């Protein structure tokens, strides 16, 4: 069994054994910490399958959770890693007690924080904390599975340029949102709209398969994923130039649009209907 003196009960990391045990309990408590994009927290995991996250120095400001971590096995692994690191550094120079204590704190702290992010965070009821290290999971630029983003935008520009009539007003852009795990790609709700543009955008999205997303803060708890909402990344095309383009330019654009639609294997009757000038 571990004794509190083995690792030391530091503010950030440590292993505490049931030296403070009661007659009814004989448990191991691992004490660690983790840092998010906003602040640092302390936490404990106990060998009875429970744990707590501490938000402040106030006793009631904490969150309880259940876990399936084998605490005894983890404590042994931490102690073994500490012994190996002490042996490694002792082989180079004689270590003072303060240096040994620093090694204990550093090794146990790193291992316990890794356990929190990999095995505890995702199981919390109020969706998990946002880590420093998961930025790649919190956003992806607008991109296309087929072709390039520039080609995608060029097609949208042709769609706008060949609109029979554009009535600019509150919506002066064609805005197309990418696909996410929650939403299909298509015209944004804040976009300029026509039935023809909606059909054309559906065709280009099916062909290029655009994707990309971000998480927007939604006034929830800043450090928790529940404080954010997934939103599609988007691209937009201005309507101003197209609205005033001369008829000859629109006719030439129509020819180019026909060729692009044919290359996408759109049915001939659909091409004729979508490019009728």
Image (cartoon, rainbow, N blue to C red):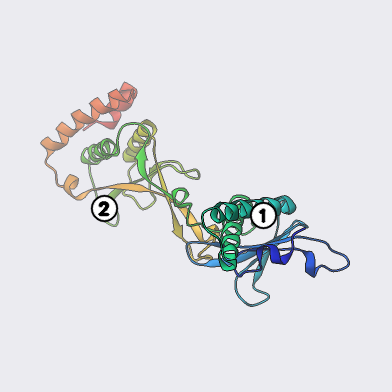
Determine the residue positioned at 61% across, 56% down: 112
Which residue is depicted at the point 29% across and 27% down? 261
Identity of the residue drawn at 88% across and 67% down: 23
- Residue 273 place in picture, x, y as percent: 29, 29
At which x and y percent is residue 91? 55, 53
Provide residue 201's location: percent of width, then percent of height: 34, 38
Q: Within the image, what quadrant is residue 267 found in?
A: top left
Q: Which mark is residue 79?
A: 1
Picture quarter with the N terminus:
bottom right
Residue beneath label 2, please?
A: 172
Q: How crowded is mark 2: few (under 14 residues within 10 Å), some or many (20 or more)?
A: some
- Residue 7: image location, x then y, percent: 66, 63
**Residue 237 showing in the rendered view:** yes
Considering depth in this image, is 112 or 60 the residue closer to the camera?
A: 112
Residue 149 location, quadrant: top left
Is residue 47 placed above or below 274 in the rendered structure?
below
Left or right for 146, reference 53: left
Quadrant position of the C terminus in the picture: top left
> Is residue 154 shown above or below 2?
above
Find out whether the residues at labels 1 and 2 contact each other: C-beta distance under 8 Å: no
> What distance separates the C-alpha of mark 1 from that of mark 2?
64 Å
Closer to the observer: label 1 or label 2?
1
Q: Is mark 1 on a helix, strand or loop?
A: helix
Left or right: 243 in relation to 35: left
**Which residue: 50% across, 43% down?**
181
201 shown above or below 73: above
Instruction: Identify which residue, 213 or 254, lies in the foreground.
Output: 213
Residue 114 shows in this picture: no
Is residue 156 found left or right of 222 in the rendered image? left
Task: Residue 165: give its label.
Answer: none
Residue furthest to the bottom in view is 58
Q: Is residue 249 left or right of residue 101?
A: left
């Amino acid at each position: 069994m571990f004794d509190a003196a083995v690792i030391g009960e530091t503010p950030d990391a440590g292993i505490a054994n049931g030296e403070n045990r009661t007659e009814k309990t004989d448990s191991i408590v691992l004490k660690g910490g983790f840092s998010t994009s906003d602040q640092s927290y302390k936490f404990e995991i106990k060998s009875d399958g429970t744990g707590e996250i501490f938000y402040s120095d106030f006793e009631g400001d904490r969150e309880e959770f259940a876990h399936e971590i084998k605490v005894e096995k983890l404590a042994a692994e931490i102690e073994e890693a500490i012994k190996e690191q002490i042996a490694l550094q002792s082989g180079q120079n004689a270590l003072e007690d303060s240096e040994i204590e620093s090694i204990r704190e550093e090794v146990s702290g790193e291992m316990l924080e890794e356990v929190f992010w990999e095995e505890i965070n995702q199981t919390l009821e109020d969706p998990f904390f946002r880590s420093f290290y998961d930025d790649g999971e919190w956003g992806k630029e607008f991109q296309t599975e087929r072709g390039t983003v520039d080609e995608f935008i060029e097609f949208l520009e042709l769609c706008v340029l060949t609109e029979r009539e554009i009535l600019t007003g509150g919506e002066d852009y064609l805005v197309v949102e990418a696909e996410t795990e929650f939403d299909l790609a298509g015209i944004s709700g804040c976009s300029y709209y026509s039935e023809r543009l909606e059909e054309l955008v559906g065709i280009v999205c099916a062909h290029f398969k655009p994707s990309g997303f971000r998480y927007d803060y939604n006034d929830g708890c800043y450090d928790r994923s529940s404080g954010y909402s997934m939103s599609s990344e988007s691209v937009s095309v201005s309507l101003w130039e197209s609205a005033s383009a001369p008829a000859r330019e629109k006719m030439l654009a129509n020819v180019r649009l026909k060729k692009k639609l044919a290359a996408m294997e759109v049915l001939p009757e659909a091409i004729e209907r979508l490019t009728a000038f």
